[in-house]
Amino acid sequence: MEIKEHIRNCLATLTPRKVQDGYKREAAVLMPIFKAGAEYRMLLTRRTEEVETHKGQISFPGGMREEKETLLETALRETFEEIGIGDGRIEPLGRFHDYVSITKYRVTPFVGFVRTPFETKRQVAEVAEILHVPFSVFLDPTKLRVEWNRHPGREPDVYFYSFGNHEIWGLTARIIKDFFEFLDLKP
């Protein structure tokens, strides 16, 4: 079975954890995956130093929910705004668990398969770089580092993935770690 179908089937059986309280606003992100040659990859962005929060950090495309918009529509709109991939190129595969960010936003991730070939066009004020990270990075235990978070009221473990000279950490790394554990893929 192709990984794309495995992801779709796994997400179809998932009852996503939905955060009901403890957040100020709603946000949604897209976990864009695509196949390059024989290898699956995840598309991530490195934020600029000019954005309001999470300067320079690696994240999924996404942002705040607008009025009358579904969370999936938010994820797709933000993906188009940030990296120029329209929803006509994205096949939604399903919703994953909700998370609460350190800024107290409820973040709802959706997984989408990006049909190739595709072009990206980064929103220069928000996105410094677009990364195409092979799944093998997330399946390699030597690429994952865990640190204990000493801040009360926050998740106790902070995850870090190494990708070249980049470090994927925080909520993005937590979502990725949970997602790949859920999929139970083998390297």
Image (cartoon, grey):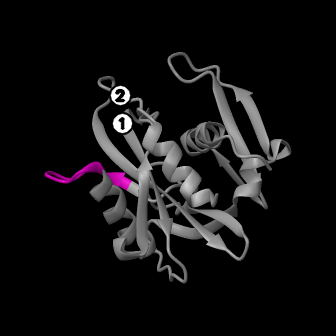
Residue 16, how many percent across, how many down? 41, 34
Q: Residue at x 28, y 58 (%)?
A: 73
* For residue 127, above or below residue 121: above
Magenta stretch: residue 59 in it?
A: no
Q: Which residue bears the numbered disc 1?
A: 106
Residue 180 against residue 89 in the figure, above or below: above
Query: Label 2 belongs to which residue?
Result: 19
Q: Nearer the viewer, residue 20 or 14?
A: 14
Q: Which residues are magenta?
A: 63-71
Q: Amino acid at mark 2?
A: Val
Q: Quadrant of the N terminus?
A: bottom right
> Residue farthest to the top?
152
Q: Nearer the viewer, residue 11 or 30?
A: 11
Whether residue 45 appears in this view of the structure is: yes
Asked whether disc 1 touches disc 2, contact meaning CB atoms under 8 Å apart, the reply is yes
In percent of width and height, residue 76 lies at: 35, 63
Q: Nearer the viewer, mark 1 or mark 2?
A: 2
Magenta span has 70?
A: yes
Mainly helix, strand or loop, the magenta region? loop
